[in-house]
Image (tube, coloured by chain):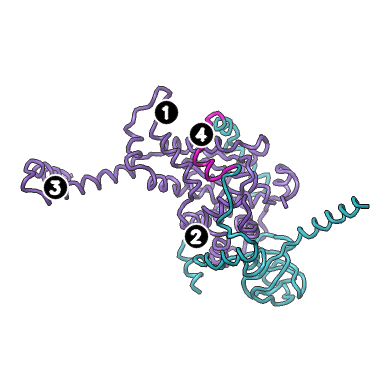
Amino acid sequence: MKTKLSILAIALSISATPASAFDFSSIGKVLETVTKAKEASTDIDEPQEIALGDGIASNLLGAAPLVKKPALQQYVNQVGLWLALQTERPDLPWHFGVLDDNNINAFATPGGNIFITNGLLQRMSSEAELAGVLAHEIAHVLKKHHLEAIKKSARTGLFADIASQALDSKGRNPAIAKLAGAGTELFARGLDKEDEFEADRMGVVIAARAGYDPFGLPAVLQILQGIAPGDSDLALMFKTHPTPSDRLSLLDSLMSSGFEGYDARPNLAARFKAINGAGKKP
Amino acid sequence: MKIRWLILLMVWCGLAHAAETAYMVRATELKAKPFSDAETVATLEEQSKVEVLGRQASWMQIKAAAGTGWVKMLSVRLGKPGAEPAKSGDGGLGKLFNLATTGSSGSTVTTGVRGLSEEQLTNAKPNPEAFRAMKAYAAKKDDAQKFAKAGQLKPEKLGYLNAGKAAEAGDK
């Protein structure tokens, strides 16, 4: 507290004598910027993170609707919440949805909204595989990967505006709507490769914690790896993620020891097929 | 007559799809059963071609020239050996290879025609009604617990894996 006061005193004295304090005033500016940057990075609290994520989810649903199968949507929510309950953020308002789209992809927004495309779901053959993919997306939420990336890409100050900006007549925060636009665009550009690898590392553990065969995620990556790189259903996934081959190599090195005891785990292929309809897409 | 041939062709395609072409990323012992201490049927060489018959947790049942058996799933990659860049940073060569084999560079595929393309994501308009409908499908904690129990999913405590372990293993 004392140092803060003395810095303030110095800053005041500098601004009072501008002619003699050229160098000092630039230090003052640096100090000011540092403080602002600090504020911007700590400004967003959990309710705001959730509001931002809900805005992004709403945008995604503007791009593609949900599959009109209530039983399937409820099923994916049960698998997803059961996984989320094994993590450090069990109390977020977790929502899961299957998007009616042939692209092969999955998305997570800040605050706990997770989407998987029907195109990806139809390539899977068990609940353990679905769990692996959902767990990967859950990890992005836990680590706030998208939130951090939005912060990096959004106009400086927008984040600070979230806290300060008055709500409009409908009770919405205009700064959040703008950031939600940036957050949706981020799905077209992708996250940092390291974020994807981290989500893979955490995803297999979350699936294992939930009692699943933890090889569901690598199995899905193997399926993706077997699809021709030119397949247009995979174009965006391939553009925004490390290659399935690189991701498999990472899991290969991580899971080669310590995962021997999981071979008797359920993969619940029958439950998956009963809900999702028969058979893999060719 | 024609229809019979068509049916035969469809059956054949179905069977052909059931077994997918794959290859071994390392020399591997082919096991008679999906256990580490099971009898070794043969030793498969790195890059040797196999056919995938199915997966059971960490094991994959495959058919090789030397016989049918089980190998660790992460020792297998789908497709033909060399059809994909093995390491990151190998994109140039891998792309050239793709161009040579499929006539597509992989990165020049068109997006923006349908669905969740780059363009549609960039221009997405919010649909708050659809999001409200999605929220109605949310599960409750009790339900998720019952659901897990019905599937005999037993939770356990397990720490996250650290990145260092991967780097270490990758160096070997």
Mark earlier in primary sequence (2, 4): 4
Residue marked by disc 4 = B125
Amino acid type of disc 3?
Answer: Ser
Q: Which mark is residue A172?
A: 1
Amino acid type of disc 2?
Answer: Leu
- Secondary structure at badge 1 equals loop
Q: Are marks 2 and 4 in contact (CB under 8 Å)?
A: no
Residue nearest the observer in this picture, A106 or A216: A106
Mark earlier in primary sequence (1, 3): 3
Residue nearest the observer in this picture, A83 or B54: B54
Q: Is residue B87 magenta?
A: no
Which of discs 1 and 3 lies nearer the camera? The answer is: 3
In the rendering, what colour is chain A?
Answer: purple
| Within-10-Å neighbours for mark 4: few <14, some 14–19, many 20+ | some
| Within-10-Å neighbours for mark 3: few <14, some 14–19, many 20+ | some
Amino acid type of disc 1?
Answer: Arg
